[in-house]
């Protein structure tokens, strides 16, 4: 291990906290000051990495009434129960928020670990490593707290984060370019195909599909025992 790097457990550098119950009567409001995230919010477009949108929000008064913990910006969150664990989703919060009781949050201690470094640590592991093997799998707070982690000094953490940010940005750019190239190829093929059929050659004639095809009925069975349709042109 490099000098200054520390091997420890997650509870020594971060606080692990579960979400709160979110009664249905409080759900559906979007204009209040505190976002209240559920597992489904991780699927909203734009929330693929950072939580920037929410389907629900609450007031400070409602938070107090529910006794819901207020998670700070930079918290790593993930599903902690049921089949959602297998989706392996991890997100980082961009503002103070609440999460429901199907979600767990890990809050970094700023003087020990950077929020982005902690997030990348989670990205490098599968949530299945933390889940039990019950019929309805779940992730226990104590298991997350005891998860081993190697923590470099803060400046080194920042350097590693910068390298990973650049790598992920390059991957995103490469993916976008590949998708655009594929679309360009499809457009080119479609254009060429339309050009072929719009510029008819000598001897071409227009006819209906019905007039040039014959379909064998469903009761006909050719050699080999498989029922098929045959077309004569």
Image (cartoon, helix red, strand yellow):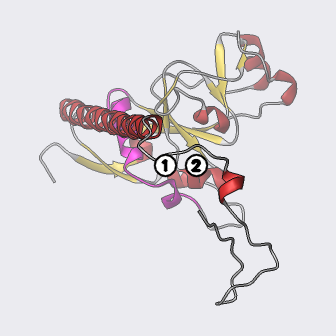
Badge 2: how crowded within 10 Å, few (<14), some, or many (20+)?
some
Q: Is residue 26 above or below residue 13?
A: above
Magenta range: 110-131
Element type at mark 1? helix
Horizontal placement of 80 versus 145: left or right? right
In which image quadrant can residue 205 be found? top right
Question: In the rendered image, which residue does mark 2 sit on?
Answer: 141
Question: Closer to the camera, 77 or 205?
Answer: 205
- How far apart marks 2 and 1 lie (CA) works out to 6 Å
Q: Is residue 123 inside the magenta stretch?
A: yes
Q: Which mark is residue 169?
A: none
Quarter of the picture containing the C terminus is: bottom right
Q: Position of residue 88 (x, y in %)?
A: 52, 50
| Residue identified by numbered label 1 | 145
Extreme front residue here?
A: 203
Q: Are marks 2 and 1 in contact (CB under 8 Å)?
A: yes
Q: Is residue 103 visible?
A: yes
Give yes or no for residue 45 being in the magenta stretch: no
């Amino acid at each position: 291990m490099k000098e200054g790097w520390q091997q420890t457990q997650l509870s020594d550098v971060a606080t692990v906290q579960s979400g709160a119950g979110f009664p249905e009567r409080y759900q559906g409001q979007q204009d209040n000051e505190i976002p209240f995230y559920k597992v489904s919010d991780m699927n909203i477009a734009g929330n693929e990495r950072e939580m920037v949108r929410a389907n629900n929000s609450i007031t400070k008064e409602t938070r107090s009434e529910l006794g819901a913990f207020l998670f700070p910006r930079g918290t790593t969150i993930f599903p902690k129960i049921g089949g959602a664990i297998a989706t392996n989703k991890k997100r980082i919060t961009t503002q103070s928020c609440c999460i429901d009781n199907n979600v767990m949050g890990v809050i970094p201690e700023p003087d020990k670990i950077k929020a982005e470094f902690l997030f990348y640590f989670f990205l490098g592991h599968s949530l299945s490593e933390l889940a039990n093997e019950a019929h309805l799998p779940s992730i226990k707070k104590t298991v997350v707290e005891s998860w081993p982690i190697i923590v470099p000094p803060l400046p080194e953490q920042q350097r590693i984060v910068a390298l990973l940010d650049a790598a992920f940005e390059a991957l995103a750019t490469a993916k976008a370019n590949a998708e655009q190239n594929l679309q360009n190829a499809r457009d080119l093929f479609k254009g060429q195909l339309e050009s072929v059929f719009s510029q008819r050659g000598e001897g071409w004639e227009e006819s209906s599909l019905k007039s040039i095809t014959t379909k064998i009925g469903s009761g006909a069975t050719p050699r080999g025992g498989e029922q098929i349709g045959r077309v004569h042109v």
